[in-house]
Amino acid sequence: MSLATDAADKPTLYKRIRADIETRILTGEWPPGHRIPFEHELVARYGCSRMTVNKALSELAQADLIERRRRAGSFVRRPQHQSAVLKIADMRAEITALGRAYGYELIHRKLRAATAADRDRLGVKKAGKVVAITCRHSADNVPFAVEDRLIDLSSVPDAATADFSREPPGSWLLHHVPWTEAEHTISAIVADDHTADALAIAVGAPCLVIDRYTWRSARTITAVRLLYPGDSHRLVARFKGG
Amino acid sequence: MSLATDAADKPTLYKRIRADIETRILTGEWPPGHRIPFEHELVARYGCSRMTVNKALSELAQADLIERRRRAGSFVRRPQHQSAVLKIADMRAEITALGRAYGYELIHRKLRAATAADRDRLGVKKAGKVVAITCRHSADNVPFAVEDRLIDLSSVPDAATADFSREPPGSWLLHHVPWTEAEHTISAIVADDHTADALAIAVGAPCLVIDRYTWRSARTITAVRLLYPGDSHRLVARFKGG
DNA sequence: TACGGTTATATGTCTAGACATATAAGTCAA
DNA sequence: TTGACTTATATGTCTAGACATATAACCGTA
């Protein structure tokens, strides 16, 4: 089996350990839920120090192949049938990376007590204050995306006084509030007249929608909806896999 | 500076280092190609041992945010600003995981010499034979996605005789041909009459499009376009960061 | 200028310890 | 039986070293 040889000719020890375990998981020998040998057992088996097996297991955990639980051990994770990971830095970096001139325009900003719809969107129960922002990002003076954002002021009080007329809220948040968890939903809609106007496209034209929710340890930070012209914008990803 | 305070309340040192660097990259302060401080510089800055900064940098490298080069240093990687990584096993697993009944229907299958359009789509130059397949996946007897696929027979000769009338080509390929690289493009279109008919939606309704190209060490295996009803299907991803 | 060999250096890997911490499991009392 | 407390243990993080190795940069020669 080539899998075994692949592992055997790995130059370094921790990579060999990682490949050994990976092979057992991918071949199904260790099914989801199976407990991987404890670190001290692997230390004995491979005759190396704990840091070496720890490095192998940590990488497998980072790759979501295994789950590590204190005191319990490490376990094979269920394969994710459909998982999408979308990393979006901020729009400025994205557009300048494309070699295009970044433009930003604040369309609307309002500080208000959270309405029922706001609470629903942010997934919070208690009524607090929020900042609602609508803005537009452009590349080479062509509308690139419109952003509709809600920031929970109980999580980010500083956002009440931040100046979003020049700095996009996404950039501001990145600098001021670290996130621990995020969720993206990608969908498609057709432009209504309001959206069509904001993006300078025709009514009924397709739009790509990214809804992103960001949390900081169970506290909602912000909910944002990004609308891109569907025929000119694409999310591209290239990746390796086995 | 809030960067410092944000970082300061991170529980562990290596995570703080990682978050500091990540923030600078994501905000564009350190653009693609920028050289990250050497390990020994970070050791001096944070007053810790080399293994600690090494762990932070290694994780950033594993996450493809930076690239590490011996003797040269560590550098911010290029395209990371907006990237989507989408892993889709096969449609059957995806739909059954949703707790819905999976249905499959082969609409069209043709073995032919590659046309110019086929070669263009597969990114190959030489004319060879291809299999073109159109099929439909349904969940609880409702159209879920239509699939339009091209398989390069010079890479996958067995596909010429495979029976795709009962087994979806995606599942068959997964079992028969390991891939090493893939690329996804997500976009949005509006349904033309043909698509609308296949998905049982209205003409002009939004559709989510996933174009996937799969390679096995520089050889193209297959190109597939998946069309989902845009208003009922969503790509959801939840992930951790920091 | 072009080429080939040498060297300095940043990363890659590894060790043998240490203490911290979350938590499964066991213990005991109400 | 249930709940609260204690304990054992596996992982999480970190240190201060070590040697390996690829390679950018330098240098000398043709």
Image: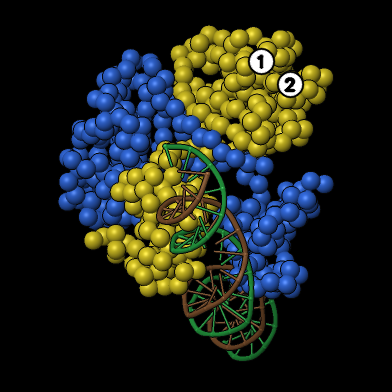
Chain colours: A blue, B yellow, C green, D brown
Of the two numbered discs 1 and 2 on the same chain, state the one appearing first in sequence. Answer: 1
Quarter of the figure with residue B165: top right
- Horizontal relation, residue A118 to residue A16: left or right: left
Task: Tell me whether circle 1 and circle 2 mark residues in contact (CB < 8 Å).
Answer: yes
Residue wearing tag 2: B154
**Image quarter (top left, top right, bottom left or bottom right) of the C terminus of chain A:** top right
| Residue A3 pos. (x, y %) | 76, 48
- Residue at 62% of width from left, 44% of height from top? A80
> Which mark, residue B49?
none
Task: Reply above or below: A182 against B86.
Answer: below
| Residue B219 pos. (x, y %) | 66, 28
Residue wearing tag 1: B126
- Residue at 24% of width from left, 45% of height from top? A131
What is the chain letter for disc 1? B
The number of numbered discs placed on residues in the rendered structure image is 2
Residue toward you, B170 or B220:
B220
- Horizontal relation, residue A23 to residue A151: left or right: right
Question: Is label 1 in a helix, a strand or a loop?
Answer: loop
Residue toward you, D22 or A240:
D22
Q: Amino acid at mark 2?
A: Ser
- Residue at 52% of width from left, 39% of height from top? B85
Residue toward you, A108 or B141:
A108
How many C-alpha atoms fall within 10 Å of the one at disc 1: few (<14), some, or many (≥20)? few
Question: Is label 2 in a helix, a strand or a loop?
Answer: loop
